[in-house]
Image: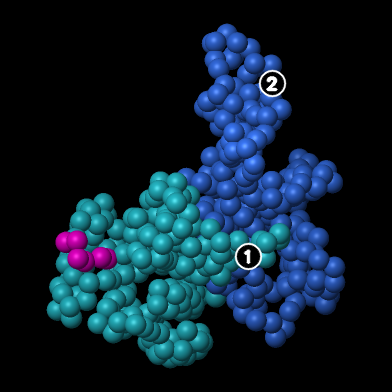
Chain colours: A cyan, B blue
Amino acid sequence: MDSDTREITRMWRVYRTIHQLCRDRNYLIANSDLTRTLDQFRSEFASSGTVDRVRLTFVVQKKDDPTNQMFVFFPEARSVGVAHIREYISKMSKESVTNGIIVYAGSMSPLTEKVRTSLPSNYRLEKFHESDLLVNITEHELVPQHRILSDEQKKDILKRYRLRETQLPRISLDDPVARYYGMVRGQVVQIIRPSETAGRYVTYRMCM
Amino acid sequence: MINDYPHVVGYNFVDTGEETFAEIEMQFPATTPKFLMLNLAEEAVRATVIREITGIASAFVNKPRFENDTALVLGTAGCNIRGIWEASLVPLDEFATIDAPGQSQEWVDINHLSTNDIAAVLRNYGVEAARMAIVQEVSSVFGAYEIGVDKRHLSLVADYMTFEGGFKPFNRVGLSSSPSPFGKMSFESTCTFLCEAAVNGDFDDLRSPSARIVMGQPVRSGTGSFDVLMDLSVSTAA
């Protein structure tokens, strides 16, 4: 298999996973984006033989709130620089979108990383390396179902079990599954594990 | 090839239907000192990497997961989850030796990878998967000796280990920070902990379940979490 074919297959998988990720975060995703075959992907985005990353960029909106949108960027350069971040932020503010994801192929310098994490508080720009998205980890048999709770649901849970926040088990902020769902510090995730004895076992973890 | 290497006088590619190989014929003058072909061949093999996944040293076919399962279970020495993800991009027909016409492009069932490298699971699949992997792996270690341990014990252990979002050891080292000497003694190395507690003049407030069991007291949970008091003056009056 030559390197171009490999690259196309790779990006096809990445593109599928990032759409699944958006779907699982309750964004509206067309079915055709989830079921696109490799050949369709090739003719749509790689007609020249290599993947045209700029054309991969897309924007999605929440199912229950069409004004809540998110950009997904695919920078063409292998290493992402501060200039890219600036460009994306200005594009986002022009469209009044506050959330974004960068899917990059190479590396991100520490300085870029600093700029990315210290954006104004109303902007959020997440990053995923392409290799993070080769496989949808939530489909693995060892990963149980995760569901992010709203602030209200979180309060209910703490009240019902008479718990303080610190008494909940924890999940790390950079845990792969927490990143997949875009969790922020303080959010609680409901985990529904299959159980041999109880059928289903529901537990919670708080993002720290 | 014959022009490039003076000792090679001929070669031939053979395909018997069952196996394919190349034959190379070499000639040396009778005065050449003896040498071992096997060593040279091994050296050449090591220097010629056709395909590899970093970190995986060897692979072998394991027992199928359940009876009459036709899927091959591949075991490997070494673990590289991301390497396997990358390798899964290569379509099956690239592997000329695996004969499976008409099969789906994905030759590895990527959602059923498992490993005893808990840290690798934690890094790539998250803390919940690591918890499940701990249960699975501990159970299989006991299973090898035909010791059945109830899954409830194991999941309690795994819950403890992954409570903080990462994983910490569940052994006497991890336990040594516990404030209850009896609890520690009932776990492992009784004498060590007993001597330590005696030397340090330690005390136990008998709150931890193991400490209470050691002393024959009901555990302070469930129906043991409260006392029933009776107002004797009322009962005698009635």
Q: Is residue A158 visible?
A: yes
Q: Quadrant of residue A196 in the image?
A: bottom right
Is A19 on the left or on the right of B32, as rendered?
Answer: left
Q: Which residue is mark 1?
A: A200
Look at 57% across and 57% down and name the residue there: B129
Image location (x, y in percent) of residue A21: 43, 73
User: Is there CB contact under 8 Å for labels 1 and 2?
Assistant: no
Q: How many neighbours does mark 2 have within 10 angstroms: few (below 14), some (14-19), or many (20 or more)?
A: some
Q: Quadrant of the N terminus of chain B?
A: bottom right
Q: Which residue is mark 2?
A: B190
Q: Quadrant of residue B73 in the image?
A: bottom right
Q: Between residue B75 and residue A171, name the one nearer to us.
A: A171
Badges 1 and 2, same chain? no
Which range of residues does the magenta coloring cover? A120-125
Q: How many neighbours does mark 1 have within 10 angstroms: few (below 14), some (14-19), or many (20 or more)?
A: few
Image location (x, y in percent) of residue B69: 80, 71
Amino acid marked by disc 2: Thr
Q: Is residue A52 visible?
A: no
| Residue B59, above or below A48 | above
Q: CA distance from mark 1 to mark 2?
A: 38 Å
Mark 2 residue element: helix
| Residue A187, above or below A51 | above
Image location (x, y in percent) of residue A116: 23, 60
Look at 40% across and 73% down and name the residue there: A25
| Residue B219, above or below A5 | above
Is A158 on the left or on the right of A197, as rendered?
Answer: left
Q: Chain of mark 1?
A: A
Image location (x, y in percent) of residue A85: 21, 66
Main SS type for the magenta part?
A: loop
Q: Is residue B232 magenta?
A: no
